[in-house]
């Protein structure tokens, strides 16, 4: 294994491109792409895992193309996004929504409360139109910046910020209609950081 691989930034490891460096990157980011594909494209979890596997293969095959001009995670998510879109094109249909949440809390009471909150949160996010849901998921769950999201989706940053604002507003209004505050699982971050 590379001597200091575990202490290096993602970008440094990706630029090195050796198998050991990619092993460290895989350990750091394992599951993130599957979660993104599952939520952003309402995909079946097994399909999302297959797409993640393919995306990792593509990332390793094309590791020489990573120039470090954007965060490694954004580059990786872009590959997963392209794989998911290809998968949908070949399937010729959008996969049906599934209940995707699996609670893992120790207490039955905590588990039930958290599950209810997560399900409510997921329903609110899934109720967003896809043009709002995808940037919202990238921002809130994967913590990409609006400029990284803009690069990924090939949109102006102002459009991404507007969609994030409309997504947050739609979730807040939907939660108000149900006379409850947004669930604890949804944080509505500011879009001001670029």
Image (spheres, rainbow, N blue to C red):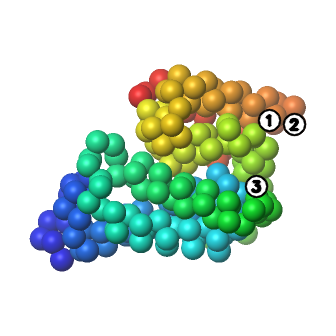
Q: Is there a contact, CB below 8 Å, between mark 3 and mark 2?
A: no
Residue 1 appears left or right of 187: left
- Front residue of 45/18: it is 18
Residue depicted at x 42% and y 48%: 74
Q: Is residue 114 visible?
A: no
In the rendered view, does 104 fall on the left or right side of 77?
right
Q: Residue at x 71, y 43 (%)?
A: 130
Q: What's the CA distance linking mark 2 and mark 1?
A: 5 Å
Q: Which mark is residue 175?
A: 1
The vertical placement of 102 against 130, above or below, is below
Q: Quick one: label 3 or label 1, which is nearer the N terminus?
A: 3
Secondary structure of the residue carrying tag 2 is: loop
Above or below, comparing residue 192 to residue 147 in the picture: above
Residue at left offset 47%, top offset 24%: 192
Expressed as whole percent of the image width and height from the top left, the position of residue 161 reads 56, 26
Q: Which residue is mark 2?
A: 178
Q: Quadrant of residue 25?
A: bottom left
Estimate how packed mark 3 is, as few (under 14), some (14 to 19) or many (20 or more) residues with alpha carbons within 10 Å. Answer: some
Q: Which of the pair 152/194 is nearer the observer?
A: 152
Along the polypeptide, which appears first: circle 3 or circle 2? 3
What kind of element bears circle 3? helix
Name the residue carrying label 3: 119
Quadrant position of residue 99: bottom right
Report, in whole angstroms, how far the alpha carbon at label 3 lies from the one at label 1: 13 Å
Q: Are marks 2 and 1 in contact (CB under 8 Å)?
A: yes
Residue at 75% over, 40% down = 128
Q: Is residue 165 left or right of residue 175?
A: left
């Amino acid at each position: 294994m590379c001597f200091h691989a575990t202490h290096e930034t993602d970008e440094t490891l990706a630029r090195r491109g050796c198998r050991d460096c990619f092993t460290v990157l895989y350990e750091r980011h394992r599951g993130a792409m599957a979660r993104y594909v599952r939520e952003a494209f309402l995909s079946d979890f097994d399909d999302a895992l297959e797409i993640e596997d393919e995306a990792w293969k593509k990332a390793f095959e094309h590791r020489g193309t990573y120039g470090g001009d954007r965060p490694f995670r954004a580059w990786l998510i872009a590959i997963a996004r392209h794989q998911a879109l290809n998968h949908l094109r070949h399937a010729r249909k959008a996969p049906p929504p599934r209940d995707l949440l699996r609670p893992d809390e120790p207490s039955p009471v905590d588990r039930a409360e958290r599950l209810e909150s997560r399900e409510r949160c997921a329903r609110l996010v899934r109720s967003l139109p896809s043009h709002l849901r995808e940037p919202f998921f990238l921002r809130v769950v994967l913590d990409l910046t609006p400029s990284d999201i803009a690069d990924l989706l090939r949109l102006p940053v102002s459009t991404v910020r507007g969609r994030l604002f409309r997504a947050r507003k739609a979730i807040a209004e939907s939660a108000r209609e149900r006379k409850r505050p947004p669930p604890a699982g949804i944080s509505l971050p500011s879009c001001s950081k670029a």
